[in-house]
Amino acid sequence: MYWIVAAAAPCTIFAALVLATRLARGAWPDLALLGQPDYLPPLGILPTLLLWTITFGVGEEVGWRGFALPRLQAGRSAFSASMLLGAFWAAWHLPALFYRDTYVEMGLLVVPMLITVAAVGSTVYTWMYNGTRGSLLALAVFHGLFDFFSVWPAGVIGPGMVMTVLMVFWAVRVYKLHGPTTLAPTGKVSI
């Protein structure tokens, strides 16, 4: 089930946003823009997706969930570990506030949004990590797809904001369904 969620959730949400854009604006968004990563020349959709999955998916998840999360869960609840990891994750992204156009445009509003996104995102990622008994590949796919669809300017109605709001509801659901101790039905993975 987690593999289906890892791959299908970001794709389904984005597809729904593309359809909503079509219905609201009467024209299809320019999906070719998905193949145009920030600060790089256009690469095409699949190479850009691969780049996102390798750098943000694999690159971040090896550290955040592969190394840090099992150690943080060893002495605390999965939720507490997620919140602590979310704080580190937010701090990791703080330098982007000074150069990434979309962050700079948001001004100081971006700081509480970044902290919120990291906290709720960390809860969902912990659910997926514990639910898959520590599969970094599932997390890398999810992280790569989520970032790919939520950040790039594809002419779609607010993908980042919509995906973030849905992530908040998802995190609340995970917390209510499985509780703070494990955030997953399978228990927590710790070292």
Image (tube, helix red, strand yellow):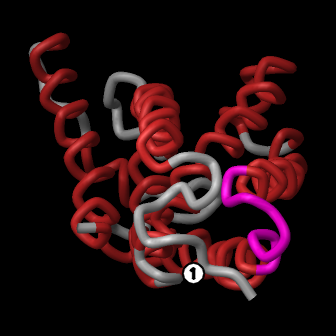
Residue 40 x, y percent position in the rendering: 59, 64
Name the quarter where the C terminus is drawn: bottom right
- Residue sitting at 46 percent across and 44 percent down? 174
Secondary structure beneath label 1: helix
Amino acid type of the residue tagged 1 in the rendering: Val
Can residue 142 be seen in the rendering of this structure? yes
Q: Residues within 10 Å of mark 1 (few under 14, many from 20)?
A: many
Residue 19 x, y percent position in the rendering: 13, 29
Q: In the image shown, does 82 or 45 lie closer to the viewer? A: 82
Where does label 1 land, which residue?
A: 58
Residue 188 x, y percent position in the rendering: 59, 72
Quadrant in the rendering for residue 102? top right
Q: In the image shown, does 60 or 82 lie closer to the viewer? A: 82
Q: In the image shown, does 87 or 75 lie closer to the viewer? A: 75
Q: In the image shown, does 98 or 57 lie closer to the viewer? A: 57
Asked whether residue 185 is drawn in magenta, I would say no
Quadrant in the rendering for residue 113? top right
Magenta-drawn segment: 71-79
Residue 43 x, y percent position in the rendering: 42, 70
- Residue sitting at 74 percent across and 43 percent down? 100
Left or right of 117 on screen, residue 3 = left
Q: Is residue 161 above or below residue 99?
A: above
Can residue 164 be seen in the rendering of this structure? no
Left or right of 181 on screen, residue 166 = left
- Residue sitting at 58 percent across and 61 percent down? 182
Name the quarter where the N terminus is drawn: bottom left
